[in-house]
Image (cartoon, rainbow, N blue to C red):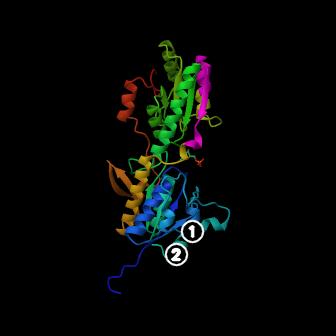
Amino acid sequence: MVGYVRPKKIGILTAGGDCPGLNAAIRGVGKTAIVEYGMEVIGFNAGYLGLINNDFFELKESQLSGILTLGGTILGTSREKPYKMIKSGEEDQHKPEKIIQNYNDLGLDCVVCIGGNGTMKTANMLSKEGLNVIGIPKTIDNDVWGTDVTFGFDSAVQIATDAIDRLHTTANSHQRVMIIEIMGHHAGWLALYSGLAGGGDIILLPELDYNIRSVCKKIESRYEENKPYSIVVVAEGINHPKNKTAASHIGEAIQTYTGIETRETILGYIQRGGSPTPMDRILATQYGAYAAQSIAEANFGTMVAIKNNKLTTVPLEDVGGKLRLVDTDLPLIDKARKMGVSFGDEFL
Ligand code: F6P
């Protein structure tokens, strides 16, 4: 038939730790693919596991309605890494081959992989195998290389900031030092942003070496200034003994060296749950729609990204296996220091 263009068939998966905004991104890709480009869309269950096991379902436009505000992911997720070979068990050696087989048997024209660094690493390897792949960056950690921001981060900052706000009042009432441990894996973005937004007195980041004497000195000087309580925001990735949490390590040390009563809060998975903020809904929607457009333009082997407030794509091979950590020269850190916020590395 002259002029006939075969509608493209695409798959979507969400992999790695979940975060608010995943459903908004699925909706963004799916609706744009169906409405604007007439594509057929399927969703794989539980991340790369769905691709390996051919476990999928058709995503019709009607199923993409009403999910914008939902937390979690309607596709489910897993931390499956198909290229991580487990020596025992012949089966495990063949996961990538199974993926390629399923991709071809289903007649897919592209698979959209929504995830963090680990997901992009796998996406890049699949792209190198000849599959058409597009990545969408998500994570509360905000540590994906190649983009200025990931969706999920803004929602997590809001949740963590709210928690810090609440700790302020009880810390003040009891004249205690409150330690709050914030997620972020190896990156300190979430601790930095929520710590500053919540008015934390001390913020400890994995990217900046802290010294416990410096932390204690800051707390004692606040005491002397008639501020007999402090909020210490601790990123989970800071250097600490492996048999303790970061918060308990810092809390115990402060109590020992200053004699001031401390209490610890580990915010945990609350930071990943619930409805996305409006900013995350918009970011995820934009990423999703742009991923669908990139498929239509055959711009494969890429990850959608925001750079200097502009939507763009970056090659997956530049992203895979890298981390975007907090730059210790960030003007924000300098401004905070000048306002008296301690990062535990002063007074040395
Ligand atoms: O990457 C998101 C994240 O929540 C990190 O902040 C945290 O270190 C990790 O995932 C927890 O992983 P899991 O879901 O496997 O416990």
Q: Residues within 10 Å of mark 1 (few under 14, many from 20)?
A: some
Q: What residue sits 65% from the left and 36% below the top?
A: 243
Q: Is residue 268 magenta?
A: yes
Q: Is mark 2 within 8 Å of ligand 1?
A: no
Q: Is residue 253 magenta?
A: yes
Mark seen at residue 56: 1
Q: Secondary structure at mark 2?
A: helix
What's drawn in magenta, residue-wise? 251-270
Q: Secondary structure at mark 1?
A: strand
Mark seen at residue 330: none
Are discs 2 and 1 less than 8 Å apart at CB?
yes
Tell which of 248 and 64 is nearer to you: 64
Instruction: Kindly indicate the quadrant of the structure image that contains residue 341.
Output: top left
- Tag 2: amino acid: Leu
Measured as percent of width and height from the top left, residue 322 is found at: 45, 50
Q: What residue sits 32% from the left and 48% below the top?
A: 309
Which-is-in-front pick, marks 2 and 1? 1
Q: Quadrant of the N terminus?
A: bottom left
Which residue was labeled with disc 2?
A: 106
Q: Residues within 10 Å of mark 2 (few under 14, many from 20)?
A: some
